[in-house]
Image: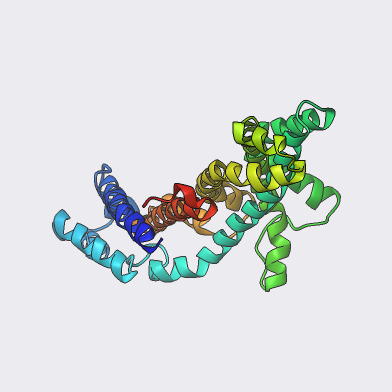
């Protein structure tokens, strides 16, 4: 198992290196002078030169690239142009809010989607199955921004049950402010998971080994929960892993609508302020998260079903 994990890490490293290189050169080939864009046409050459030096733009591109990679290894993403603070410190203070939101959305999605998917498959072609599939179709059809506004109007303005913006100060306030944003992300994820779990379960139910288990007298509960569910979870893990990436991306919109602090809102603010070091730091962290999540998903395959573990 350890060899498999090490092998997956060695495969993930080149992927991360290539992606980080694409981020660096993509930002460098953008037209225009970043310093001039920040300070405006009226800035003097002396001020522009000082800002270019501050941004590390006064050295050749290859040296900027080396400094960029070395900075990532040290956890140093430079200083923010708009705040003057180290980007790594800004990310460190803001990142927990994004992680709480993504985890909250994932929990809501799994709590809604997996049980309903199992129930829908077991009750195939019944009224309950049709009702669950109809609810899932509605959940998928709602755009995230519409769902966020709907929740705000109903639960914040009409019922006044949950706050519509901010993140709170204490831990309990954090959880309280997290309810509506987590529901916004989780409802859509739950609808997707429900349909995928149902489809995966039905594929397994129709396999020969399930018919053999039933013919030997195994109870329906044993067949479903010991054989079918276990094998059905493998493709579901893939979907959850991909959806975690989507949750992190969706957090950008959700954080903006609910006026929450987070990595997404910080990246949007960096784009507006043309704060390239901050934007670059956010993109690098997103890349590390996506590669890390995919690595965890690959390792999870072999934990759920050791038969597919490579020798």
Q: How is the image coloured?
A: rainbow
- Among all residues in the image, which is located at the extreme top? 125
Which quadrant of the structure image shows residue 224? top right
Which quadrant of the structure image shows residue 234? top right
Residue 241 at x, y = what percent?
51, 48
Q: Nearer the viewer, residue 166 or 246?
A: 246
Q: Residue at x 34, y 58 (%)?
A: 9
Image quadrant containing the N terminus: bottom left
Is residue 121 in view from this perspective?
Answer: yes
Number of disc labels: 0
Horizontally, residue 311 falls left or right of residue 33, namely right
Residue 276 at x, y = what percent?
35, 55
- Among all residues in the image, which is located at the extreme right? 159
Q: Nearer the viewer, residue 133 or 273?
A: 133
Residue 233 at x, y = what percent?
59, 45
- Among all residues in the image, which is located at the extreme front? 216
Horizontally, residue 281 falls left or right of residue 146, namely left
Is residue 46 in view from this perspective?
Answer: no
């Amino acid at each position: 198992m350890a060899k498999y994990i090490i092998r997956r890490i060695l495969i993930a490293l080149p992927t991360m290196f290539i992606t980080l290189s694409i981020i660096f050169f993509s930002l460098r080939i953008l037209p225009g002078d970043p310093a001039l864009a920040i300070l405006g046409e009226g800035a003097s050459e002396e001020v522009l030169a000082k800002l270019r030096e501050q941004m590390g733009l006064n050295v050749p591109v290859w040296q900027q690239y080396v400094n960029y990679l070395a900075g990532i290894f040290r956890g140093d993403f430079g200083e923010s142009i708009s705040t003057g603070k180290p980007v790594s410190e800004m990310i460190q203070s803001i990142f927990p809010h994004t992680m709480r939101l993504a985890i909250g959305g994932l929990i809501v999605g799994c709590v809604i989607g997996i049980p309903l998917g199992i129930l829908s498959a077991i009750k195939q072609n019944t009224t309950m199955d049709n009702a669950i599939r109809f609810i899932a179709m509605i959940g998928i059809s709602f755009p995230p921004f519409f769902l966020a506004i709907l929740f705000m109007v109903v639960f914040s303005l009409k019922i006044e049950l949950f706050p519509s913006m901010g993140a709170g100060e204490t831990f309990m306030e954090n959880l309280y402010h997290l309810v509506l944003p987590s529901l916004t992300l989780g409802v859509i994820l739950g609808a997707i998971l429900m349909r995928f779990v149902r489809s995966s379960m039905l594929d397994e139910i129709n396999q020969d080994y399930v018919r053999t288990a039933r013919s030997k007298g195994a109870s329906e509960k044993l067949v479903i929960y010991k054989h079918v569910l276990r094998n059905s979870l493998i493709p579901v893990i893939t979907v959850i892993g991909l959806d975690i990436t989507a949750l992190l991306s969706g957090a950008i919109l959700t954080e903006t609508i609910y006026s929450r602090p987070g990595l997404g809102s910080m990246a949007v603010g960096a784009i507006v302020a043309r704060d390239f070091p901050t934007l670059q730091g956010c993109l690098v962290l997103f890349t590390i998260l996506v590669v890390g999540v995919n690595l965890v998903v690959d390792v999870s395959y072999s934990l759920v079903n050791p038969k597919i573990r490579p020798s």
